[in-house]
Image (spheres, helix red, strand yellow):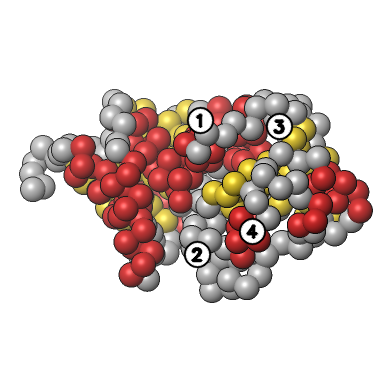
Amino acid sequence: MITGQTKNFGVIGHPIGHSLSPAMQNAGIQAAGLDCVYIAMPVEEEDLAQAVTGLKTLGFQGFNVTIPHKQAIMPFLDAIDEDARVIGAVNAVAIQDGFMTGYNTDVVGFLQGMHNHGFSPAGKHAVLLGAGGAARAIIWGLIKEGVASLTIGVRNVVKAQAVADYFRPYMQIQVMDWQSWEFRRMLIKSQLLINSTPLGMEPNTLTMPPIDWAAVPAGIFVYDIIYTPAETMFLRMAREHGCQTLNGEDMLVGQGAEAFRIWTGHQLPTEPMAQALRKCLENQ
């Protein structure tokens, strides 16, 4: 029951009606027996400054941030955590005594997914497909974890090179055309293969990055951050090739649970969150 003592959390974005976060977070909150509620709040771009002030005034302890506000919100915050600063995007804001700090929990969610399945990227040769917005959190997570090498395979090498150059102070990253022979040679020695592109996401489930599976070592860890469908064509091909596979569900749940931990200090049980997520996806 929601009372005057109930603590409020939520997510802002536009559009926001499609967000799975309320169902996922509220399932974790309920399982943990906490007097909290999590809601979706539509905020248009021109209203962002007022919304940020309003959430602080209304006593929210924290909120998530999604498209189109992940970069735009940063000037309105009092502090930015290192992960968010390096990635250049905020997806969670904590409010304590009126002081607002921005975080990016995608790094924790991304790494937690692999750790949950007994895999660590530390010391591994990693290959990443795509260099868009999602890739920045993945790259930073791999750097923090201590990968031995990182190669990015893309369609547009020039655009991706700018991303690699940005991370040059932390690690030397190779960028290659994913249909080149040079990229095929990197696949041959890979131990971790990650898809950060939207290729294969519903409704375009018959698409996937142009991978030469003959060059992919059988048994390596293959990670697709897409979670709709649960098994993309990319992951199906990897599974049939004998690889260990993982979709983006753990990453989504993990980043949500990490945000709630930052806000409250409570670690939400992730299995009820994952179950609520799956139920929402089945009903879509």
Q: On the image, numbered disc 1 is attached to which residue?
A: 80
Q: What residue type is disc 4 on?
A: Glu
Rendering quarter of residue 47: bottom left
Q: Which mark is residue 124?
A: 3
- Reading the chain from its start, which is encountered first: label 2 or label 1? 1
Between 137 and 273, the one lying in front of the other is 273
Identified at 54% across, 38% down, the residue is 114
Q: Are marks 3 and 2 in contact (CB under 8 Å)?
A: no
Q: On the image, numbered disc 4 is attached to which residue?
A: 240
Between 10 and 128, the one lying in front of the other is 128
Alpha-carbon distance for marks 4 and 3? 22 Å
Q: Are marks 2 and 1 in contact (CB under 8 Å)?
A: no
Q: Secondary structure at mark 3?
A: loop
Identified at 59% across, 52% down, the residue is 224
Q: Mark 4 or mark 1, which is nearer to you?
A: 4
Task: Please state the horizontal and vertical placement of residue 4, each as a whole percent of the image.
Answer: 8, 41
Q: Is residue 161 left or right of residue 114?
A: right
Identified at 59% across, 46% down, the residue is 244
- Reading the chain from its start, which is encountered first: label 4 or label 1? 1
Q: Are marks 4 and 3 in contact (CB under 8 Å)?
A: no
Q: Which mark is residue 229?
A: 2
Alpha-carbon distance for marks 3 and 2? 28 Å
Placement of 122 over or under 109, stated as above or below: above
Q: Mark 4 or mark 2, which is nearer to you?
A: 4
Task: Please state the horizontal and vertical placement of residue 170, each as a whole percent of the image.
Answer: 73, 27
Residue 182 can be seen, yes or no:
yes
Q: Is residue 266 left or right of residue 234?
A: left
Q: What residue type is disc 3 on?
A: Lys
